[in-house]
Amino acid sequence: MLFVPLIVFCATYVLMISLPKIRHWIAAASAVFFLVWGCVTSGSGVSGALTDAASAINWNVLMMLFGTMGTVYFFIASRMPDVMAEKILRIAPNTMWAVVFISLFSGFISAFMDNVATVLMIAPIGLAVAKQLKISPVAMLICISVSSNLQGAATLVGDTTSIMLGGYADMNFLDFFVFHGKASIFWAVELGALATVPVIMFLFRKQRQKMQITVSSKVQDYVPTYLLLLNIVLLIVASFLPNMPETINGIICLSIFAVTAIYSLLRSRSLKNVAASLKEIDYSTLLLLGSLFIIISGVERAGILDELAKLIVRLGGGNLFVVYTIIVWVSVLMSAFIDNIPYVATMLPVVASMAASMGCEPYVLFFGLLTGATLGGNITPIGASANIAAIGILRKNGYEVKNRDFFRIGLPFTLVAVLVGYLYIWFIWA
């Protein structure tokens, strides 16, 4: 029973990487297959398939995307990204350092809020910077997305996988900084982030042109910026509040979009801007992400992730360093192709069981799992929601991202950051 869904899963990703312009339709077709396959194998019928689809989709992420895309339209129209871009260019000595600064800024924000929301909010600034420099924004936005994805594991509120680990290991926000008297995973991620700075400098080593700001933009309306900042604050606050609904982040983003749209309607006394904001939402990216959630759920139900966990146990052979190494690098590989949320959910109890069988504390394995699973998504353009969102933004602005463009940045970013985190966690926690 594993053979057919595994073949379809592999074929889906090969086709999506080979045919990026229609990857959302490929994903949608594969999602339909997994729903039909689930009906056939479980005998649940059409209603069961629809129920499976609804439960598999991460509505929180899709609602966040929809709401933030809408709000960001008004943010861009206000000219605030242009002003912020000019400020970055004034402090950056050249193009290379401008990319470094905006990447680090994106990573810092992402440590405290969702990666996708971070990309949607920082991408307009990156586009404005590229426009001022008269260069293609493709590499700039890829750096923003991979930096955002990298920092997600730094804090309890930075990524869903961090929240899952915090709940499973009974860790609070401060435990991500210092845990059991030792420097915790935050420092592993930050060291990895610092290690990527030379990577950016090498990739952009030829772009040393000096900054020349010949114009000075003015903000047309500050309210969209204030509402976007309120969005960030509410997302951070919600992460600390207990018993929140699973879709609380999506609800916040949709609500802020609604308030922004109503404000625009009252200010302009016209539906023109509201209609334009709805038109600018990247529906193909929403379709792609929704389909991927269904595909990964189908892979999980088929038992493929369970079989992978059993394989890791067998390969480890009871040696802590071998088990730790396998967990980190298999997690990197898996997260390059599947959503890391179901993978981490499957592996957390497996990792705890491995540690118990070896008579050691599980934290070195927990942190290795989180490091590999969170950073691995940067290897491929469809390995993380943040990357998909960034590529969607570029496509909406008329830029097509080739696979080699992404691999040129994502691959060294991932390898350097994971290697640093891998060594740090082992020497501090083993």
Image (cartoon, helix red, strand yellow):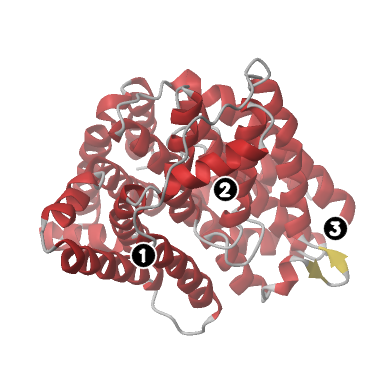
- Toward which corner of the image does residue 399 lie, by quadrant? top left
* Number of other residues with Cα within 10 Å of mark 2, as a class: few under 14, some 14 to 19, many 20 or more: many
Camera-nearest label, 3 or 1: 1
Q: Residue 203: x and y, percent?
A: 64, 22
In whole angstroms, how far apart are the C-alphas of marks 3 and 1? 47 Å
Query: Which kind of residue does numbered mark 3 sit on?
Result: Trp
Up-down relation of residue 50 to residue 40 (above or below): below
- First in residue order: circle 3 vs circle 1: 1
Find disc 3 in the rendering and name its residue.
429
Q: Is residue 419 left or right of residue 306?
A: right
In whole angstroms, how far apart are the C-alphas of marks 1 and 2? 22 Å
- First in residue order: circle 1 vs circle 2: 2
* Number of other residues with Cα within 10 Å of mark 1, as a class: few under 14, some 14 to 19, many 20 or more: some
Q: Is residue 397 left or right of residue 363?
A: left
Which residue corresponds to the image point at 58% horizontal and 56% vertical from the top-left? 109
In whole angstroms, how far apart are the C-alphas of marks 3 and 2? 28 Å
Judged from the image, the secondary structure of the residue bearing numbered disc 3 is helix
Query: Which kind of residue does numbered mark 2 sit on?
Result: Ser
